[in-house]
Amino acid sequence: MARGRAATYDDQRGLILRRAAELFAQRGYAATSMNAVAEACGCSKPTLYHYFRDKDALLVSICDEHVLRLHALTSEVLALPLAPQDQLRELILRILDEYADAQHAHRVLTEDVRFLGAADQARILGREREVVAGFARVVGAIRPDLQAAALAKPLTMLLFGMINWMFTWLKPKRPDAPQGPGGDLDHAAMAPIVADLFLGGLAAVQPTKAARSPALTS
């Protein structure tokens, strides 16, 4: 009879993924060895290889699990009976809440996806595109004229430009660290600010002006 997994298997696996994501985010995927990951986890290399066959498997799991969480929360919000503007606010809140607890994984997904094999990269980027498409549907529902002018997705990408790179300047607050550009703000406080900024700007977009732009018509 095959042996079942120990009760602590998932906890240990989760710890390894968190420590590996932190190292990849700080040092870069290419510069991080499995020895370094094992040391950070306080385990032996054989134990590490019991959970992940190699460094590539670690990267795939970090990216896969992070993007699956983003995909799941997007689907949950899209299923809520909310007005489009409230739905977009909730999407922004949920995404930033996820980023707050997964800054290292998000950085790895943003910067190290290029190291994935072709099939893994295609699958993960495909899920990312589905998340963007979900946001774009809500943007189009808020401004159907922009949807008709094929501007819902470009505007959604501008929104993600605001939130996806927040990790570069909005750091977790630590009492022993100097105050960063975000001051006392955290991800939860930034969510309504991002929503106000985007929705306020969205109301001012004129599709006729955008249509005359060479950048959008080329």
Image (cartoon, rainbow, N blue to C red):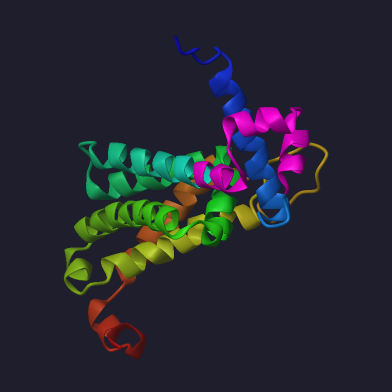
Residue at the spot 65% in from the left edge and 41% down from the top edge: 20
Q: Nearer the viewer, residue 16 or 194?
A: 16
Residue 56 in sight in this render: yes
Q: Is residue 171 left or right of residue 141?
A: right
Across and down, in percent, residue 59 comes to 56, 47
Across and down, in percent, residue 15 comes to 63, 29
In reply to whether residue 104 is colored magenta, the answer given is no
Q: Which residues are magenta?
A: 33-61
Tally of marks: 0
For the N terminus, the image quarter is: top left
In reply to whether residue 37 is colored magenta, the answer given is yes
Q: Nearer the viewer, residue 11 or 90?
A: 11
Q: Is residue 204 left or right of residue 97?
A: left
Label the magenta part by its dominant secondary structure: helix
Q: Is residue 177 left or right of residue 85?
A: right
The answer to which image quadrant residue 132 occupies is bottom left
Task: Please identify the residue farthest to the top as the structure is shown.
Answer: 1
Q: Is residue 206 above or below residue 73?
A: below
Residue 183 in sight in this render: no
For the C terminus, the image quarter is: bottom left
Across and down, in percent, residue 33 comes to 73, 48
